[in-house]
Amino acid sequence: MTAQPPLRLGVFTRLVDDAPPAELYAQALELFAAAEERGFASGWVAQHHAGQDGGLPSPLVFLAAAAARTRRLRLGTGIITLPMEDPLRLAEDAAVLDTLSGGRLELGLGTGGGALVSALFGRSPADRRAAYADGLRVVRDALAGAELAPGGPALFPPAPGLADRLWEATFGVPGAVRAAEHGSGLMLARTSVSPVPGSSSVPPGTPLGEAQLPLVEAYLAHWKRPDSTPRIGLSRSVYVAPTRAEALADAEAGFARYAAQAGPEAARGARNDSCVGTPDEVLAALRADRLLPLATDLIIQVHPVDPGPDRTLRSLHLFASEVAPGLR
């Protein structure tokens, strides 16, 4: 039997602490620096406009600052909402960041789905899938070095290899199939509850790995690239504390805040899909995940517990020292 490759560990932040933006960004940079020191392979941020669900509308700008603070950590977007972007400008910005960081960018893209943000950018939520498909074609071709117009120049600066470091996020099997056909990495969410109302058909209480297994199976079945291997990124909510009582107390407060913000259904899904507890309890929960043996990347976040910066760093340290050694 072929040995499984080492599992790459990543950390993700939504920048949601109750603090001024400058403080939020400084905390996130400290988290990335701490992750690199503790052996994590990657640090990830998401794009959220107008302060909805997170505090970072410009992830590539933030990751440029993170590139200056780190030397080895890979820098990921999980995700940029492509239908809100000019795809050629996005490709240019990504190429500059990849150049500055020494080829460390992992470019994750998705459709988004928020009606308010779509309206702010003059887009229609109903058109987001078509806009995503068109934008992704532009981004992929530009990063691959194609002419930007017939007889015209190629992308500058060039970004050799970045086209092979694209990731696509999805909540459904069709999206997983498209990611495989594009040769992109498959990015799976921390919950099976889709942010688009009415689009999720997973029975309540289904373990997250079970709910997402059909996506992974479809992705692997449709992978066609002989020159590269599939990449499967699991995003998981993980909060580690020294005692079970402390972990549960912090989590209860976090889930209550999240319920007030996102509603009871999302909060129930988040509670069901989160790994909260002592190092031994978190390790057992992660090892029970059906998808862990198939994953290439495990990307952890403390959202929606959001215990504050000091306890977030403590959770990261406990995970690195006491949980990670028990994983693949």
Image (spheres, grey):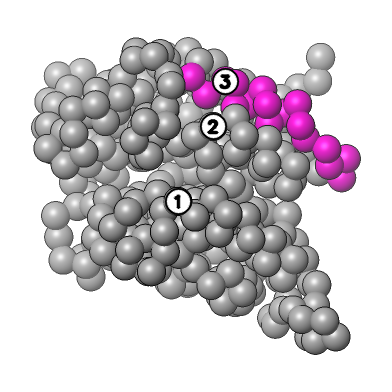
The part of the image, by quadrant, that contains residue 233 is: top right
What is the three-letter code of the residue carrying label 1?
Answer: Ala
Please give the residue where the numbered disc 3 appears in the rendered image: 213
**Of the residues tagged 1 and 2, which is closer to the observer?**
1
298, 33: nearer the viewer: 298
The part of the image, by quadrant, that contains residue 251 is: top left
What is the three-letter code of the residue carrying label 2?
Answer: Gly
> Circle 3: is it few (<14), some (14-19), or many (20+) Cα within 10 Å?
some
- Residue 229 image offset from top left, x and y in percent: 77, 38
- Residue 186 image offset from top left, x and y in percent: 61, 39
Residue drawn at 24 percent across, 60 percent down? 51
Mark 3 residue element: helix
Which range of residues does the magenta coloring cover?
A: 211-227
Please give the residue where the numbered disc 1 appears in the rendered image: 126
Question: Number of numbered discs present?
Answer: 3
162, 40: nearer the viewer: 162
Query: Can residue 144 be found in the magenta stretch?
Result: no
Q: Are marks 3 and 2 in contact (CB under 8 Å)?
A: no
Please give the residue where the numbered disc 2 appears in the rendered image: 172
Does the magenta stretch mainly form a helix, a strand or a loop?
helix
- Residue 38 image offset from top left, x and y in percent: 45, 45
What is the three-letter code of the residue carrying label 3?
Answer: Leu
**Of the residues tagged 3 and 2, which is closer to the observer?**
2
Mark 2 residue element: loop
Left or right placement of residue 40 versus residue 137 in this view: left
Q: Are marks 1 and 3 in contact (CB under 8 Å)?
A: no
Q: Quadrant of the C terminus?
A: top right
Q: Earlier in the sequence, mark 1 or mark 3?
A: 1
241, 161: nearer the viewer: 161
Left or right placement of residue 257 versus residue 93 in this view: left
Query: Can residue 212 be found in the magenta stretch?
Result: yes
Q: How far apart are the alpha carbons under marks 1 and 3?
A: 27 Å
